[in-house]
Image (tube, coloured by chain):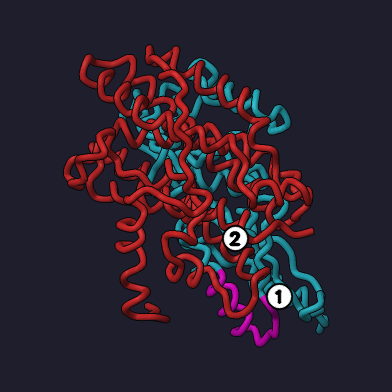
Chain colours: A red, B cyan
Amino acid sequence: MQAPVDYLLHLADNALVLGQRNAEWCGHGPILEEDIALSNNSLDLIGQARLLYQHAATLMGHGATEDTLAYFRDVPDFRNYTLCELPHLPLMAATSAGDRDFATTIVRNFLYSSLMVLVWDRLQSSQDAQLAAIAAKSLKEVRYHLRHSRDWLVRLGDGTDESHARVQAALDAFMPYTSEFWVASAQETAAQANGCGIDAAALRDDWNSIVDAALQEATLKRPADTAFLPTGKQGVHSEHLGFVLAEMQSLARQHPGATW
Amino acid sequence: MTTTLTPAEQAWHALEALSDPEIPVITLRELGILREVREGALGLEVVITPTYSGCPAMGQIEDDVKAALATAGLQATVVTQLAPAWTTDWMTEAARDKLRAYGIAPPHACASEKAGSANVVQFAARSARPEVVACPQCGSSNTTETSHFGSTACKALYRCLDCMEPFDYFKPY
């Protein structure tokens, strides 16, 4: 049994886009240890993306490779959650790289990792044996990502007035984007139907437990749910993904097939 | 006396001594990366498994394996296999001793992964971190974690509060 290609791309695009985002900290971390931590986080995510793209490319045939999938698809082809593509800023008006906000990075990694420990855990029993194998590896990695982001969430939330205010602002800005986790897309429904995917909505209670326990420890207030529903995994993205892809894909598009 | 080795035995012989590119004191076999040599659909197959998904050494490891096989005059295909997922629990005692002697604290046993999400919450909680990592320099257990992530994806940064030396800890995976 094989997972639908679009479902594999959804999982891969999440990992690649967030990996690319977090890699923006490489050389700019607030302290050396965090520079290394975020680079390692990106390395894991991009590694997961590669395994998933390789699997998808094998199923697709017709000359598809991990590189054609990562570098030669455009914004509407990407199936990642909108959450993964947003800049490291709670205020969308600011876009300067120099304004990168570490609290925002931590909040996003925490919200995403809290979901993915559950997703990868369930996908270990996917009917798609290769996806199950990738899930087993990814689970080991995302546990470290969750531990890292959760520790910082607590340190910042239960820290100084400024760190608390910043992490609360990031939480207020990003929490509404998590609504996308729970409304199944066509590819998720198809994957669940053939036994290769999961029912994401069924993970919601477990995710709430992980998130609420950490927010309480961090003395943060969970913002109320809103009616906002992002549509990144349907291919309808925020204005930010295009800039991420432009930077990531420009070299491969200027020099197709380049190697070193 | 001449003994005739099977191709698989010759391959093991050729690959036995290959070391990890990042941690040269231990071999790929001791690390559990070099998993199997078998007669398969592709002829003689050498099975390797990646450590972390994004480990940048995997390309180098595959090249090293191919080069060693070529030097031994063996026709073999290198197969990368993900399942069962690599774990630090496969590391031999001899490898752990070598790591310690090299200045890297060897990994603890992995926690049971059967508990699923409940385990995840517990893993992330600050209070549930009982493991003591002994300093590979002086043996003291009075150590502290500087950073979850170190010089490579598989290691964390620690510091000994007795001899004051910083050191790497090979994380359980």
Q: Is residue B20 above or below residue B104?
A: below
The residue at the point 31 percent across, 70 percent down is A250
| Whether labels 1 and 2 share one chain | yes
Task: Answer left or right for A96 relative to B13.
Answer: left
- Percent from the top left, x then y, of residue A58? 65, 70
Disc marking residue B28: 2
The residue at the point 58 percent across, 21 percent down is B122
Magenta range: B62-77
Decide: few, some or many residues near mark 1? Use Cα within 10 Å; few <14, some 14-19, many ≥20: many
Nearest the viewer among A113 and A84 is A84
Magenta stretch, main secondary structure class: helix
Image quadrant of residue B70? Answer: bottom right
Q: Which residue is tagged 1?
A: B11
- Chain for disc number 2: B
Instruction: Judge whether residue B86 can be spotted in this image.
Output: no
Image quadrant of residue A84? Answer: top left
- Percent from the top left, x then y, of residue A156? 31, 22
Nearest the viewer among B98 and A186 is A186
Task: Answer left or right for A195 relative to A50.
Answer: right
Disc marking residue A180: none
The residue at the point 77 percent across, 48 percent down is A193
